[in-house]
Amino acid sequence: MASFVSWNCRGIKHKNTNLKDIINDYQPVCIALQETHLKDEGRINIKYYSVLTKNNINGRASGGVALLVAHDSPCIPLNLNTPLQAVAARIQVQSFLTICNLYLPPNQPIDQTHLNNLISQLPVPLLLLGDFNGHSPLWGSPDSNSRGFQIEQLLTDHNLCLINSGQPTYFHQPTRTFHVIDLAICSPSILPFLDLTIDNNLHNSDHFPVILTDNRSGQYTSYLSQKYVFAAANWVKFSLLANITSEMVENNTIDDAVSLVTKTIIDAANDSIPRSKGKNRKQNKPWWNNECQQAQKRLRKAWGKFRRYPTTVNLIAFKRSRADFRRIERYSKRTSWKRFVSSITSSISSPELWHKVKKAFGTPISNPISALCVNSQTISSLKGIANTIASTLSNTSNSKNYNREFLNHKMKTEKRKLNFNSRSDYSYNCNFTFQEFQACLSNVHKSSPVPDNISYIMLLHLTTESQTNLLYLFNRIWNEQCFPSSWQEAIIIPIPKPGKDITNPLNYRPIALTSCLCKLLEKMINRRLTHFLENKNLLSPFQSGFRKGRSTLDNILALETDIRLAFLQRKHLVAIYFDIEKAYDRTWRYGILKDLYDSNLRGNLPIFIENFLRLRRFRVRLASEMSDYFIQEEGVPQGSILSVTLFILKINNVLNQLHLSVKGYLYVDDLCIFCTGMNMNCIQRQLQTAI
């Protein structure tokens, strides 16, 4: 069931720990915070949540509201035209629900017109949460004030329902009294589905968190997917169970053999490697220890005693316990931070160093899911969003995106069938050796184990006999020129492009996850392909992308040298940088094969690439939802080992089209051209001609 939390935190800067406790307790879809006390540029970073804020604009750290939305809940922020401290978003629960967070300061007059204008901007059904600082017997107050009359009028004018049942939400410490000023208001259509409870703990504030639960089942899950815990694996047992026999790889078709090998490895992993429980996503507190836990217990005990018997003695005991807990908490945080920083030494590896840096900066490990707007229609269900993004990616790779002139050239050229068959025994077509297998397997990097759930670390822990039989299967695929159908599938994880409108499905970068078994074979083939291209000098010397001994530094130094030379000769130098849109997705596949053919590649290697590029399909995954299957008609598969080399080969000749007076450099699909001369007009003409 989906839950929503409203809490006046009285300054979020020092309440992150308390906010994490609330999140861990209730796993809310949305959290409405009031009185965040953030200045104009203040920000909140909470793992697994997107944050919408409206801070006080007078430069003081007072007031302010924030709305936190879980990443796996599709939402669309709403732009409110109001002077009130309010922020709102439409969130997909079972259908779209508008949630607005509102804070009305106690000593500031509020115009009823502003309240009416705010409600008129909120699509129904709506849920209005916040600290209204209003008193009325309607929600359990013993008396009324002018703010209370305003809220009553708002409920009447807009046919809204009050959810509060009279439970106190605010503790006034000077008078030791409890009040109801944090309200939850909703549209009549959703009132039967919402249950309200009040947390018993103040969480270091003077307001109790208000929790609303949508009692309709089967709507929201914020569970992490189950993953193998490799640190606790029994690798000896795994190696014995993951026994890839010669019968598996010799006496079955290629597809059946791949299926049997995959099943054997996964069954062994399930029996020897524990899996995470897939519990709710937790907010970590690395500094939390037993001393903090005991201090928190004493604090809650003192607060419970004061709630039952609100005497001066019990209030003093509560304050003392709270001060003691804060002291222990600060000390624990300092100690934990010192220990963390001390672990960064000169002997630490680069990957581990960057892991610690990202951890210290709180680098997000998930991306928010936004509802999409396509042709004036809003798509909010996870399945609908996944299918829309998948359809957009499929359309991007469609040959219809080519211009008419190129389409005519494409149709004419593709009439010629490329025959890669050859009787010659080229060295790059021979069987793969165990040394090649081991060399590629030893250089693998950490990779997500989908779609077959096999990871590289499992392959590393196979016995020598199993690895030898796996190599035999690879050589069968190589020699029989049959590409496994299960390896033609990819799982796409869409990543929003920074600074772009995330409601537009075109503004997502596809991260493709393919089979690690396939990628291991690709590595072996890619080594032979790059060796052939480099030895034959078929790649441009000005291409620095993903080539041994080359890097972006080569292009930077070369351009810097030309700039210095131009200065010495008192000449102008003008450079133009190109970012090729959808470069990988729209690469002409037949053009790649033709370049391989023109490079005199024949036999197993080009035939494998031909089969590798054929009939590619993919699904998009959003949270736990998968899209339907879609076809990638053109382009090279994203996330593939071979794709980069194939793209480099295809773009290789672009620099040959430049005039002698125009130079250029490439880093895969990033192109820079520049021209030097005495006359600026002449330089412009040369560059325009080159473009």
Image (cartoon, grey):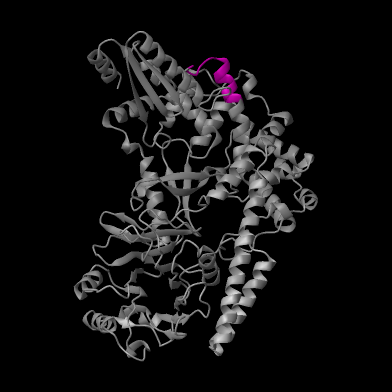
Q: Nearer the viewer, residue 221 or 218?
A: 221
Residue shown at 24%/67% (left/top)?
121
Q: Nearer the viewer, residue 219 or 569?
A: 569
Measured as percent of width and height from the top left, residue 6 is found at 42, 73
> Dividing the picture into quarters, in which one does residue 657 lie?
top left
Q: Nearer the viewer, residue 527 or 83?
A: 83
Residue at x 52%, y 72% (from the top left corner): 204
Q: x%, y% of residue 139? A: 36, 87
Q: Which residues are magenta?
A: 528-541
On screen, residue 565 versus residue 231, left or right, reads left
Nearer to the camera, 37 or 462: 37
Image point 36% across, 58% down: which residue? 371
Image location (x, y in percent) of residue 618: 47, 47
Residue, far top: 569
- Can residue 603 be seen at all in this image of the molecule? no
Depicted 512 relative to depicted 316: above or below: above
Does the stretch in magenta take in 89? no
- Quadrant containing the C terminus is top left
Report the side of 599 relative to 269 (left or right). Answer: left
Q: Is residue 276 left or right of residue 185?
A: right
Residue 435 visible (yes or no): yes
Q: Quadrant of residue 172?
A: bottom left
Q: How many marks?
A: 0
Left or right: residue 66 versus residue 463 is left
Counting from the top left corner in percent of width and height, residue 579 is at 37, 32
Please say if 220 is above or below 403: below
Q: Is residue 533 magenta?
A: yes
In the figure, 617 relative to 7: above or below? Answer: above
